[in-house]
């Protein structure tokens, strides 16, 4: 079976661990979010690609969910002694090697897809991990503070400001001119099932969908498309997805996020051709049972990915909803 998933960082990576365990023989392609990518100290850093790669490759920090296990931060501390920041970004010493390899390969003319494949030669994540685009796309957040109204990089908003300053807009800079990376559209067209893990609907899944062509490919694939809610009982399980949803005018609830993704096919009574959404099925937590989204099958299952067994059960429920 061919499975294609779109993925952000921690929520996506943990779900994918369940996909791999539930479907040992499946060919899994992961389209990773690169909207979080940032250049710091002239280094190309791809947090979400690395989170997926380290999580599936066994190198992730179990406690933090990002960066490497057994990490040290000596380089960051030495930079701070020179008064060089940013202090808000956890640049780990082990992680630094990944950024150095990526930066050197990009400078030598390799694409981000090539670089990601090369890094995965070491980590062997057991899935084909491809970036959403080889072109530079960065999520920026429009805020107003003492320095006035301006756009800052998503990482600065998320890590330095802890998303506490309201986002007036969230912009995918560069997306309009970006192309999907090689293999992205084919992976969607040729899949037997497409899964949207419980990743951030705005800055992870939304960023991937901002690359022209990806949304249409999702709408047109013959495969069933099923999403898993990152919102349980009106709150994100982890992180500040509510601040991102507020910025796009979507309530923080499983129902509102399901309606935001929308149904691929028109529901009963709706005019033909009126559906413009992405999903055939929406999996919500049991506390959200009863949620309805026009045109979509909705099922309820406990959605806390507390351990691998619980995650495998979530994946199985999503596959059942997809009918595969
Ligand atoms: P990020 O890039 O590290 O922020 O990770 P993602 O975008 O892939 O996923 C972030 C989302 O994962 C958050 O909005 C959380 O609500 C969601 N999440 C984290 N853990 C769980 C879980 O155990 N169950 C569910 N349903 N969602 C989760
Ligand atoms: N998340 C944090 O909360 N603090 C950090 O200092 C931090 C550094 C970092 C470095 C490399 C990396 O791959 C991920 C890192 N993350 C960090 C996670 C990540 O930047 C974001 O939390 C997610 O991308 C949010 O969507
Ligand atoms: Ca992310």
Image (cartoon, rainbow, N blue to C red):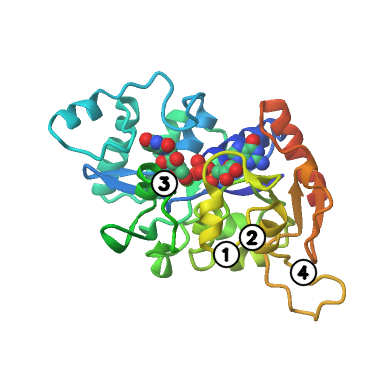
Label number found at residue 249: 1
Residue 86, image x, y percentages: 25, 40
Q: Are marks 3 and 2 in contact (CB under 8 Å)?
A: no
Give residue 171's quadrant in the image.
bottom left
Disc nearer the start of the sequence (1/4): 1
Left or right: where 134 falls relative to 236: left
Q: Helix, strand, or loop for circle 3?
A: helix
* Quarter-of-image position of residue 23: top right
Residue beneath the point at 77% across and 69% down: 265
Sequence-first disc among 2 and 4: 2
User: Which residue is tagged 2?
Assistant: 189
| Percent x, y of residue 62 | 51, 24
Q: In this rendering, which labeled residue sits more in front, label 3 or label 2?
A: 3
Characterize the local packing of mark 3: few (<14), some (14-19) or many (20 or more) Cα atoms within 10 angstroms. Answer: some
Label 1, label 4: how far apart the Cα atoms are: 23 Å
Distance in Å between CA atoms under marks 2 and 4? 17 Å
State the separation of the CA atoms marked 2 and 1: 31 Å
The N terminus, quarter of image: top right
Badge 2 vs badge 1, beta-carbon distance below 8 Å: no
Which circle, 3 or 4, is nearer the viewer?
3
């Amino acid at each position: 079976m061919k499975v294609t998933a779109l993925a952000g960082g921690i929520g996506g990576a943990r779900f994918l661990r369940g996909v791999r365990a539930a479907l040992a023989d499946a060919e899994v392609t992961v389209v990773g979010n690169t909207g979080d990518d940032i250049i710091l100290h002239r280094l190309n850093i791809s947090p979400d690609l690395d989170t997926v790669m380290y999580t599936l490759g066994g190198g992730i920090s179990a406690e933090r969910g990002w960066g490497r296990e057994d990490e040290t931060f000596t380089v960051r501390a030495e930079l701070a002694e020179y008064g060089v920041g940013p202090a808000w970004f956890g640049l780990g010493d082990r992680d630094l090697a990944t950024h150095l390899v990526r930066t050197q390969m990009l400078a030598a003319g390799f694409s981000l897809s090539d670089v990601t494949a090369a890094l995965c030669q070491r980590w062997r994540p057991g899935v084909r991990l491809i970036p959403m685009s080889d072109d530079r796309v960065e999520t920026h957040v429009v805020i107003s503070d003492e320095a006035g109204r301006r756009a800052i990089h998503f990482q600065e908003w998320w890590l330095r400001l802890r998303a506490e300053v309201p986002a007036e807009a969230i912009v995918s800079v560069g997306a309009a001119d970006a192309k999907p990376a090689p293999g992205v559209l084919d992976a969607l067209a040729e899949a037997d099932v497409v899964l949207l893990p419980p990743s951030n609907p705005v800055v992870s899944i939304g960023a991937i969908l901002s690359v022209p062509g990806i949304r249409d490919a999702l709408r047109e694939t013959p495969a069933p498309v099923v999403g898993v809610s990152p919102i349980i009982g009106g709150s994100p399980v982890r992180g500040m997805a509510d601040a991102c949803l507020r910025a796009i005018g979507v309530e923080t609830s499983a129902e509102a996020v399901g309606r935001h993704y929308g149904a691929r096919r028109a529901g009963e009574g709706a005019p033909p051709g009126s559906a413009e959404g992405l999903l055939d099925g929406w999996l919500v937590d049991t506390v959200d049972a009863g949620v309805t989204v026009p045109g979509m099958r909705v099922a309820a299952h406990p959605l806390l990915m507390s351990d691998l067994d619980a995650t495998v059960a979530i994946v199985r429920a999503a596959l059942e909803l997809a009918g595969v």
